[in-house]
């Protein structure tokens, strides 16, 4: 039985009993029971973080000594919403990434180089990325506890979507959808671990491969260029996981820390450019590979609880994390010429694998 059903059942039972007594005794009429809230939990937060070594595939600088710098600092501004209701949960995250000059915005096509192949000092890219996930619990839908066994707390249907836009010359316009299941497990100290096997479908845009562009492999629609730059990738698989746990084993004077993290794998989704010419194997391949996007660990310090007490738990958090993203956006970090490697030499641009420690502050409101 769901919490909502239990509460409503209790309200109706108490109301019936009170009615029986009212027929026998001249008592003051009882106040109506309070309405059960539609959302049991509503949690809204804003964050600011700084990432010293972010990457954007194909954005890099060739240094005078021949080495390549493929990283750039990024400021990240985020809004996160989470809610729980009678039949499941909803999660929304919207982030804006503001890059340094090594990740140059249009009209540059790379750091210091405009689309006309002339020198240009373009501003850093601004990217906005949104992610939404919604679950519908089987225990709640079927009014049972059959899907709670041992550490398994529930099984849920999960659906979601991602959207992205930026001011690169590339003109990315990602739209993706996921659907599948989520298995939710309990961890010690009020923690949890969720794993979701999903189907994944993506549509995106690439101005470099649009027919008429001087950068297209050829001007043959469907073979060397895309008519409008849009590309519908084939449906593939995905696995998304996340966890959270308070460090409850610490002494009471230090119980202000928690750890959390996530990891996600997305299967190959076809040619990276929507063009079959180089999608085979080898150093010039443009076939996508398994994408691994993770934040294995985030250590959080509950600053508001430490300063103001239990009542203000997680109102202000300070945190530090490690982020690792291989084959970013599905590009093969060992191939994908002009993006992950220099086509003529095969040298890595160091822009398709992201590995950085970063930190930030999160405030609840």
Image: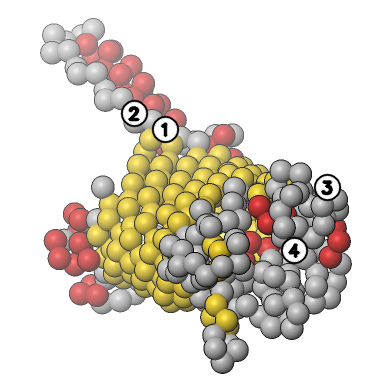
Instruction: First in sequence, mark 3 or 4: give its number.
Output: 3
Residue at horizontal 33%, vertical 57%?
Answer: 47
Residue at horizontal 58%, vertical 44%?
Answer: 161
**Distance from the alpha carbon under mark 2 to that under mark 1:** 7 Å
**Distance from the alpha carbon under mark 3 to that under mark 4:** 20 Å
Disc 4 on helix, strand or loop?
loop
**Distance from the alpha carbon under mark 3 to that under mark 1:** 56 Å
Q: Which residue is mark 1?
A: 4
Mark 3 vs mark 2: in front: 3
Instruction: First in sequence, mark 1 or 4: give its number.
Output: 1
Residue at horizontal 75%, vertical 58%?
Answer: 216
Instruction: First in sequence, mark 3 or 2: give its number.
Output: 2
Looking at the picture, tell me which residue is in the foreground, 194 or 44: 44
Residue at horizontal 28%, vertical 52%?
Answer: 364
The percent coordinates of residue 63 (x first, y second) are 54, 85
Give the quarter of the image for residue 14.
top left
The percent coordinates of residue 296 (x first, y second) are 51, 71
User: Circles 2 and 1: CB distance less than 8 Å?
Assistant: yes
Instruction: First in sequence, mark 3 or 1: give its number.
Output: 1
């Amino acid at each position: 039985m769901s919490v909502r059903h239990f509460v409503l059942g209790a309200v109706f039972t108490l109301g019936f009993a009170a009615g029986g007594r009212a027929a026998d005794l001249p008592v003051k009429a009882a106040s109506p029971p309070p309405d059960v809230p539609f959302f049991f939990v509503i949690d809204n937060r804003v964050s600011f973080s700084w990432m010293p070594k972010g990457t954007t595939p194909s954005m890099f600088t060739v240094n005078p000594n021949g080495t390549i710098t493929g990283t750039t600092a990024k400021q990240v501004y985020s809004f996160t919403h989470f809610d729980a209701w009678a039949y499941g949960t909803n999660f929304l995250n919207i982030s804006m990434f503001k890059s340094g000059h090594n990740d140059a915005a249009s009209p540059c096509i790379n750091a210091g180089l405009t689309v006309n192949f002339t020198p240009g000092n373009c501003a850093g890219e601004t990217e906005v990325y949104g992610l939404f996930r919604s679950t519908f619990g089987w225990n709640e839908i079927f009014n049972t506890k059959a899907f709670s066994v041992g550490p398994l707390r529930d099984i849920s249907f999960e659906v979601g979507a991602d959207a992205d836009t930026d001011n690169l010359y590339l003109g990315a316009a990602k739209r993706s959808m996921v659907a599948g299941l989520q298995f939710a497990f309990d961890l010690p100290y009020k923690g949890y671990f969720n794993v979701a096997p999903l189907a994944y479908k993506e549509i995106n845009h690439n101005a470099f491969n649009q027919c008429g562009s001087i950068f297209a492999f050829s001007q043959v629609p469907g073979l060397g260029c895309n008519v409008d730059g849009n590309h519908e990738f084939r449906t593939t698989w995905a696995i998304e996981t996340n966890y959270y746990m308070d460090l409850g084993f610490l002494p009471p004077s230090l119980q202000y820390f928690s750890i959390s993290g996530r990891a996600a794998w997305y299967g190959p989704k076809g040619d990276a450019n929507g063009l079959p010419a180089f999608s085979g194997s080898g150093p010039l391949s443009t076939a996508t590979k398994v994408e691994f996007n993770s934040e294995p660990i985030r250590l959080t310090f509950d600053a508001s609880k430490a300063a103001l007490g239990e009542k203000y738990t997680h109102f202000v958090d300070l945190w530090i994390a490690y982020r690792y993203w291989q084959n970013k956006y599905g590009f093969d970090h060992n191939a994908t010429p002009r993006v992950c490697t220099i086509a003529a030499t095969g040298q890595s641009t160091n822009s398709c694998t992201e590995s950085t420690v970063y930190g930030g502050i999160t405030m609840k409101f």
